[in-house]
Structures are given as C-alpha cells and as structure tokens.
Image (cartoon, grey):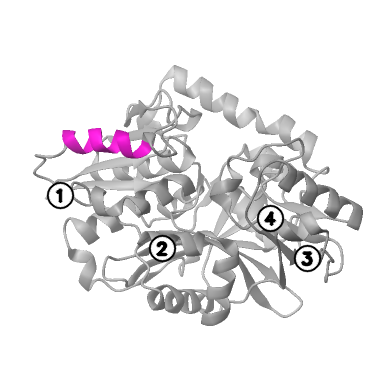
Amino acid sequence: MTPKFTPIILGSDMNAYGMARAFHNEYDIKVHCIASAPLAPTRYSKIVTLEFHSGFDEDPVFIDTMHEVAKRYANHTEPVILLAMGDAYAELMAKHKEFLEQNFVCPVVDYDLLRKLNNKENFYQEAEAHGLPFPKTKIITKEMYEKKQDLDVPFTYPVALKPANSVEWLDIHFEGRKKAFVIHSETEYLDIVGKIYDNGYQSHLILQEFIPGDDSNMRTLNVYVSKDHQVKLMCLGHPLLEDPTPAAIGNYVAILPEYNQGVYDVVQKFLEDINMTGYCNFDMKYDSRDNTFKFFEINMRQGRSSFFVTLTGYNLARFVVDDYVTGVLKDAPTIYANKIQSQHMLWLGVPVKLFKDYAVDNEYKRQAEALIDSGQYGTTVFYKKDMNIRRWVLLKYMFHNYIPRYKKYFEENKGRDIGR
C-alpha cells in the first residue's frame, strides 16, 4: 500500500530535481518546489510544480512566504514533508523549525547545531573532538587583515583558502571570486585575502595545507539519520572529475560508487554522538602521505550530486518517508552502501565525451568507462519519464555548455589540482 504524504522541496536546482525524481521513482507522485528563482534542472518538468518568490532564500521573504504556505496545509490530513536543498534554505528551515513543525515534517537539526557545523571553523573543532581527520588549518580573521598582523602562511605553497561561512559567502561578489582558492604564492595570497574582506565578507577564512592529488582522490558521503538520531543510510561516492568553473569549483560531475567500512564507522559514531537528524553530506580527500581521508566539511543537507545514491539503488526519498510516515525505518538496520560492485552505476553531470577527455587516466577511470560501455550509468536530469522537446533541448544545451567551460577554466584553475 502506497503511503500518503505530500513532499515540498525548497529549491529548484540540480539537488531539487534529484530529490523530486527520487520521489517520483519510488511513489509515482509530483513534488512541489518553492524557490527564489527558476533554474534549468527543474524547468519544463511534469514531475514538479514550481512556485517562485524573489528573495525567498532570505528572511523576511522566507518566513512570510512559509506562513502563507502553512495556511494552505493547515487542515491537511496527511504528513507534509519539507526538505531543503541548499545551505541557505537548510539554515532558514532550522531557524524557523519551531514554527514550521506545526504544519510540516522537518527533518533538520536544531538551529544552534546547524549554525555550528555549517561554519567550517566550528566543524573542525568538532571533528578534532570526535576523531575525524582534517587538513592542517589556520584561521584568518578580518581583524588580522585590517591590522596586517599574523597573516603568515605556516604551510608550504600551494595552500587552500576558503570561507568559513558558506552562507555569507553566497552574497559576496568580486572579480576572481571562487568557491575555494588554491594559492601558489604570498603575493597571490595577500591579494585574495584583501579582495575578500574589501568586498564585504565579515567572517573568518580557512587557510589549509594543500592535500596533493587530482580529483579522483576526493570522496563524498551522503547520509540519512533518523529522527531518533540513528544513522540509517551511508553511501560513499568516489568523484573522478569536478567542475573547474570558478563559482562552482568543487562541484562533482562524475561519481563512482565506493565502499569503505572504515569511513562509515568513524562518521556514524560522529553523527550519532552529536545527535544529527535528517540528511547530510561530507566532502573528504585521500591523503597518500599518511593513508587517511581528510574531511573538509559537512553540509547539513544531501549533496548537489546526491542523486548518485538513488541511481545506484538506495532511493533517498524512501528513507525520510519510512522514518516519518510509515515508521518502518525505526527497526531497520543501517545500510552501508555499495558492497556489491556489480550493482554499481556511474553518475555523470557532464557529457560522456567530456568525462573521457578530462578525467585523469587511472584504474578508477577505467572502471567508469567499463560501466559506460555496459550501459550502467545515468544522470540526475535526463529522466525518460519526464521528457518533452523543450526540456530535452534545454538539458542538451546545459550539458553542452560544459565544453567551453572546461576549455576555458580547466588548466587555468588547475583542474586536476584542486585541494579544497
């Protein structure tokens, strides 16, 4: 018997479409998306309905809108599940959780914990306390920059530099802005720090040692934690290629499923110790110098490329439904995904040819190419049950648009040399 519930997604991006597709795959239902602006992945879709409010990713528009949305569902008899697809939406959902829970199922942690873990500086403090390895780190503050004190770099170049506050960073703009920087000299370092603070950024910066290696040393882990704070799904992905575009550096465009019980065990203990709830995602990189995975961050939501989890057989939507609607998740064992390699599916966010041209040549690329040759691959957005001529043309254009971006930025941004 199909469970009765209504899903609402906050966002209209790739992540939003991936979750909508997961709900449609599993339950043959449409999903309502509310966002600040239309984005290509959800346009011309028949499995989503779209609602846009300019400024919805900030207060007061967010909470004012959600008061109106809550009125629509005030007398709803079935659960209404609210899911956030981006950092800003997750933070707003946690901030207003007490109000939202009056009408919606809200699988998100409390605001204080989310704010703590969304800040990379605080995350590293928690990681150290719970035994999660992370790169050697120095915190840079605006006061250091203004006083021109303590700005020395204690690591060998190149070094990595990124904002501690990823939500604030969304509102900062300047020429040369990137999601994260790999810096090769003191002159470049001081120039970038100056641009960041001179253009309005207030929070701390994370300066880190560079973890050597190409994109295929990265790993991404998507997790679902029940309302009882028990980890129920862990699915590790092995990225083979990343987006080199400055604003999107670090976004994965090719992921091979991977199994690693050691990673699963240390992350499960961490999440259960901090009383996590809902979806989250970790980024990490393998450090060949000491044979460990170094953790870069936790996202308090599923990752942008998280459809790779559903694609390889672990439908992400089912976990929240079984947790809050059917209740069967309570007694279900933890799933440690990807033990059976024959069931693996390669996830792609770019054309096959581009992947073959730019992914570094190693054993993992050959595994991916074997999956491609056997038809065991897929994307988030190309969904046979949700296709029409306008959507097909848009998606083809969206994928084709990666070709000039790689030609322009791949070498410039050290495409195989991103250290996060």
Q: Residue 77, percent across and down?
A: 8, 44
What kind of element bears circle 4?
strand
Q: CA distance from mark 4 to mark 3?
A: 17 Å
Q: Which residue is mark 1?
A: 3
Q: Residue at x 24, y 49 (%)?
A: 99
**Could you say which is closer to the camera, residue 368 or residue 81?**
81
Q: Are marks 2 and 3 in contact (CB under 8 Å)?
A: no
Position in image of residue 150 (x %, y %): 81, 67
Dominant secondary structure, magenta: helix
Range drawn in magenta: 62-72
Question: SS of the residue at dot 3?
Answer: loop
Pointer 2 or 3: first along the chain: 2
- Of labels 4 and 3, earlier in sequence is 4
Question: If you read the primary sequence from the N terminus, does the residue marked by circle 4 or circle 2 appear first?
Answer: 2
Q: Residues within 10 Å of mark 2 (few under 14, many from 20)?
A: few
Q: Nearer the viewer, residue 247 or 30?
A: 247
Q: Which residue is mark 3?
A: 212
Give the residue number, with chain letter if any, for mark 4.
Answer: 162
Q: Left or right: where does residue 337 sit relative to residue 23?
A: right
Q: CA distance from mark 4 to mark 2?
A: 22 Å
Amino acid type at mark 1 = Pro
Q: Amino acid at mark 2?
A: Asp
Work out whether 244 lies above or below 273: above
What whole-number distance in Å separates the C-alpha atoms at marks 1 and 3? 48 Å
Give the amino acid type for the residue marked by disc 4 in the picture: Lys
Quadrant in which the C terminus is drawn: bottom right
Q: In 3D space, how far apart are the residues under numbered discs 1 and 2 (Cα atoms)?
A: 33 Å
Cβ atoms under marks 4 and 1 closer than 8 Å:
no
Considering only vertical position in the picture, is 84 above or below 203? above
